[in-house]
């Protein structure tokens, strides 16, 4: 294990201090009414005299010669990079979104233009021969010269692009952190003019806009400080860690650290008290990995005196990535989570290591095999956290069991007995950021996949994903979810609906939950609809869904069964779904029978099949749906 030193070896710091001396003095006149100035000063006194990032400076050859073994793939990638010119910035690609709403071209250009930094720095720190330094300097200069650090979709008025007004988004925060980490690791190996340009760019794109935001002068474009979703954690992590990594003034670093402590609680508010993440499993890793990284930097920089995990809700939020699994590696992809989203083993191992859960036999081995992301995260793979906690609570033996129940949103994860491979996750609400209209949705897991139920979120976003047209997409409205369509009417916007849990009954052998979905529909003919899910663990497992509809008159209903697999009719009551070596038999019992329909949906890069059981109710009645595994 490689330890992180209390006072890392640093070079070139005095030149950097001189460079920033005047700006720091100028910033002293700013007022920060939302922050307790005594707390700012207290935190400043906790910080070391000199800033430091993750790991140790690359001049510490004893540490980096040991760490180099973990970065050999990065060395090979860096070798390929320096054999070709650096991909250029392209105005036309950046402006594509402002022309037609396409996000992908501009984001791909940004990735190409800045994406060499991580492997180049890791390769240089591993070999320490100067081979990659010219390209690193070229990459830093190119980043410093970029007109905008924000993603094109986050700069719709082109204020950043035209230099009218700079503000911090997800990309600017992460890029700023990587630039700061590069300057920290390589010290005076970076040419002084390049370092000066990089520091000026950090001030322009990150530090300056954040001071305005902390002072209350920037609330329009940095509203994420008060946001209860992943932006809060991701952006606070990037800007705070960049400040703690590179700003020479302890007072300045104290300001950024105090601001993170003050506003980061908003992110935890996106979780229920029981730990359910309203953004879904995909955005859990994105948001919480940044929250954890922010916590790590604050913990390290203050010698453990400031710990964002000193909060019972933080622990519950951390365990979501483990407790939301219905089968190993299989999670319900509610909201905008990609189909078959699952947290990376490296991040789950990080959580396991911090909380001493004992889930994995060798956390460090898993962490060090992780895919490389941003530079700071990559450095942590070889210089892992040493900030373990010893909280009382769940352990590897007690944390899962046969179910996880999140009572506030009404979300139930049902798992089979040991050796079983058929499971279900069903939800009442829990809708917030990245919501779909999916009240009563479920996902059935079998073997290593999700065979039927919620199809997951977009493969990519476009200009209409987050505006008033969002729920015109069949992937995002209730048409594409396993919930009933009643009298031709889809569900209302789920974030404005408050479904209720009617009852629950849990036992070792079987679980039942009843959900009142009435509030999700605006149909004068509908008086009430209650969906009851019954899950049994006996044998190979089975699910029964019962929709009880109380109506004023005749009603036309379509029960929906989305799948990424294929549908084969079996008889008048049943059909079979096959996908990736898994098969289920679906039997629908309804008054008067039903007509089977199949609609192909392909919105935003997520193609799936919406199987429909179209039926007519002459009066109030119920539809019973049985879903059972089919032996291969």
Image (cartoon, rainbow, N blue to C red):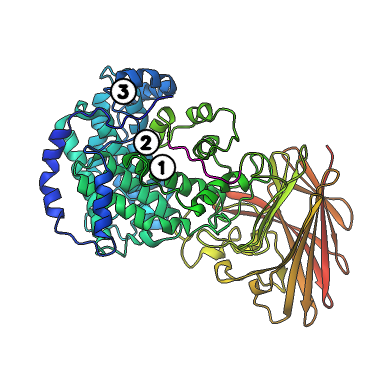
Give the mark nearer the N terminus: 3 vs 1: 3
Q: In the depicted view, which residue is nearer to us: 361 or 482?
A: 361
Q: Nearer the viewer, mark 3 or mark 1?
A: 1
The disc placed on residue 293 is 1
Magenta segment boundaries in residue numbering:
387-394
Q: Callout 3: helix, strand or loop?
A: helix
Within 10 Å of disc 3 (Cα), the crowding (few <14, some 14-19, many 20+) is: many
Q: Position of residue 374 (x, y in %)?
A: 39, 37
Find the distance from the CA under tag 2 to the CA under tag 1: 9 Å
The disc placed on residue 376 is 2
Q: Is residue 342 visible?
A: yes
Residue 522, quarter of picture? bottom right
Given contact means CB atoms under 8 Å apart, are the residues at marks 2 and 1 in contact?
A: yes
Residue at 14 percent across and 34 percent down: it is: 14
Residue 474, quarter of picture? bottom right
The disc placed on residue 124 is 3
Q: Position of residue 302 (x, y in %)?
A: 32, 42
| Left or right, residue 412 beside residue 544 | left
Residue at 58 percent across and 56 percent down: it is: 274
Find the distance from the CA under tag 3 to the CA under tag 1: 24 Å
Q: Callout 1: helix, strand or loop?
A: helix
Q: Position of residue 69 (x, y in %)?
A: 43, 19
| Left or right, residue 250 beside residue 320 | left
Within 10 Å of disc 1 (Cα), the crowding (few <14, some 14-19, many 20+) is: many
Q: Position of residue 351 (x, y in %)?
A: 52, 40
Q: Please identify the quadrant where the C terminus is shown.
A: top right
């Amino acid at each position: 294990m490689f330890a992180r030193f209390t006072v890392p070896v640093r070079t070139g710091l005095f030149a950097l201090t001189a460079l920033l001396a005047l700006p720091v003095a100028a910033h002293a006149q700013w007022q920060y009414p939302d922050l307790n100035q005594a707390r700012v000063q207290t935190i400043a006194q906790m910080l070391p005299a000199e800033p430091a990032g993750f790991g140790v400076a690359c001049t510490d050859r004893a540490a980096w010669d040991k760490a180099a073994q973990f970065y050999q793939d990065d060395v090979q990638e860096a070798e390929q990079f320096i054999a070709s010119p650096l991909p250029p910035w392209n105005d036309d690609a950046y402006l594509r979104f402002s022309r037609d709403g396409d996000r992908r071209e501009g984001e791909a250009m940004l990735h190409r233009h800045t994406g060499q930094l991580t492997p180049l720095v890791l390769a240089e720190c591993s070999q320490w021969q100067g081979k990659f330094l010219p390209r690193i300097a070229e990459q830093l200069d190119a980043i410093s010269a970029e007109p905008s650090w924000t993603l094109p979709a986050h700069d719709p008025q082109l204020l950043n692009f035209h230099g009218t007004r700079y503000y911090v988004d997800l990309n600017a925060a992460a890029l700023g952190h990587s630039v700061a980490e590069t300057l920290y690791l390589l010290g005076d190996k970076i040419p002084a003019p390049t370092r000066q340009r990089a520091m000026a760019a950090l001030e322009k794109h990150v530090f300056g806009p954040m001071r305005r935001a902390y002072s209350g002068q920037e609330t329009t474009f940095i509203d994420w400080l008060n946001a209860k979703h992943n932006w809060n954690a991701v952006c606070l992590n990037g800007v705070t860690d960049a400040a703690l990594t590179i700003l020479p003034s302890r007072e300045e670093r104290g300001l950024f650290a105090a601001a993170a402590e003050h506003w980061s609680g908003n992110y935890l508010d996106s979780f229920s008290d029981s730990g359910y993440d309203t953004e879904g499993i995909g955005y859990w890793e994105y948001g919480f990995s940044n929250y954890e990284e922010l916590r790590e930097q604050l913990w390290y920089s203050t010698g453990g005196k400031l710990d964002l995990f000193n909060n019972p809700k933080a622990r519950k939020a951390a365990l979501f990535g483990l407790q939301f699994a219905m089968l190993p590696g299989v999670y319900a992809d509610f909201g905008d989570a990609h189909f078959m989203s699952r947290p990376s083993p490296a991040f789950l191992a990080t959580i396991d290591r911090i909380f001493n859960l004992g889930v994995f036999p060798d956390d460090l081995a898993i962490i060090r095999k992780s895919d490389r992301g941003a530079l700071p995260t990559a450095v942590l793979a070889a210089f892992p956290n040493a900030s373990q906690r010893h909280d009382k609570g769940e352990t590897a033996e007690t944390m899962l069991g046969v179910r996880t129940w999140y009572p506030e949103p009404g979300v139930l994860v049902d798992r089979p007995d040991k050796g079983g491979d058929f499971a279900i996750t069903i939800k009442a609400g829990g809708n917030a950021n990245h919501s779909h209209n999916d009240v009563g949705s479920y996902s059935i897991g079998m073997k290593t996949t999700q065979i039927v139920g919620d199809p997951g979120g977009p493969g990519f976003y476009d200009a209409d994903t987050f505006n008033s047209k969002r729920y015109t997409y069949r992937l995002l409205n209730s048409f594409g979810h396993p919930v009933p369509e009643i009298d031709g009417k889809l569900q209302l916007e789920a974030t404005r609906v408050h479904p209720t849990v009617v009852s629950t009954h849990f036992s070792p052998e079987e679980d039942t939950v009843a959900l009142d979905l009435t509030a999700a529909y605006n149909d004068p003919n509908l008086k009430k609809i209650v969906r009851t899910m019954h899950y049994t663990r006996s044998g190979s497992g089975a699910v029964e869904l019962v929709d009880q509809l109380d109506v004023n008159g005749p009603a036309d209903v379509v029960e929906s069964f989305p799948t990424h697999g294929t549908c084969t009719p079996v008889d008048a009551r049943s059909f079979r779904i096959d996908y990736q070596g898994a098969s289920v038999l679906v039997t629908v019992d309804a008054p008067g029978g039903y007509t089977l329909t199949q609609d192909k949906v392909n919105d935003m890069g997520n193609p799936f099949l919406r199987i429909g059981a179209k039926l007519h109710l002459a009066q109030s009645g119920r539809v019973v749906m049985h879903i059972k595994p089919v032996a291969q």
